[in-house]
Amino acid sequence: MFRRTFWFTAGAAAGVWATTKVNRKLKQLTPESLAAQAADKAVEAGHRLKDFALDVQANMRRREAELGEALGLDAPDGPRDDRELGAPRRRAALGPRTTPDTTTYSLTYNRNEDH
């Protein structure tokens, strides 16, 4: 009698565990959940890419300073802000703009000519 009760309880517990596991997996595979997971991974990848770019920039500046010292070049005075934009470029003035003469044509449509 105890053997049957044990196996019945073990089977019921396994069924509840399996059902819970399947329901959790199904909730993870809904479109909303997949979209949220993709967005989280994209944000994480963006942060890693930004960190990588900052590391490259810092190492590039360090190496440029080393090379400048080795070659005896003067470093620019004060810190540089690479985010600052340069002066805007302007087109060279070639003279006044001339527009070509436009000829207007008068087109008339006669329906009787189609036959």
Image: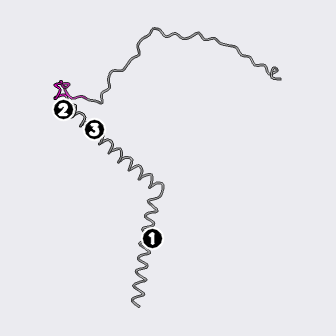
The kind of residue on which mark 3 rests is Val
Q: In this rendering, which labeled residue sits more in front, label 1 or label 3?
A: 3
Label 2: few (<14), some (14–19) or many (≥20) C-alpha neighbours in 10 Å: few
SS assignment at label 2: helix
Residue plotted at (43% across, 73% down): 16
Q: Are marks 3 and 2 in contact (CB under 8 Å)?
A: no
Label 3: few (<14), some (14–19) or many (≥20) C-alpha neighbours in 10 Å: few
Relative to 106, 101 lies left or right: left
Q: Position of residue 33 (x, y in %)?
A: 44, 55
Label 1: which residue? 19
Q: Are marks 2 and 1 in contact (CB under 8 Å)?
A: no
Label 3: which residue? 56
Q: Position of residue 55 (x, y in %)?
A: 26, 40
Instruction: Reply above or below: 99 against 46.
Output: above
Q: Residue placed farthest to the top in the image?
A: 95
Which contiguous range is marked in magenta?
A: 68-80
Label 2: which residue? 66
Residue plotted at (41% across, 91% down): 1
Q: Position of residue 14 (x, y in %)?
A: 42, 75
Instruction: Reply above or below: 64 against 53.
Output: above
Q: Give the mark, 2 or 1, whose residue is nearer the N terminus.
A: 1
Q: Residue placed farthest to the front in the image?
A: 71
Magenta stretch prevailing secondary structure:
loop
Q: Give the mark, 3 or 2, whose residue is nearer the N terminus.
A: 3
- 79 within the magenta span: yes
Q: Residue placed farthest to the right in the image?
A: 115
Residue plotted at (45% across, 67% down): 22
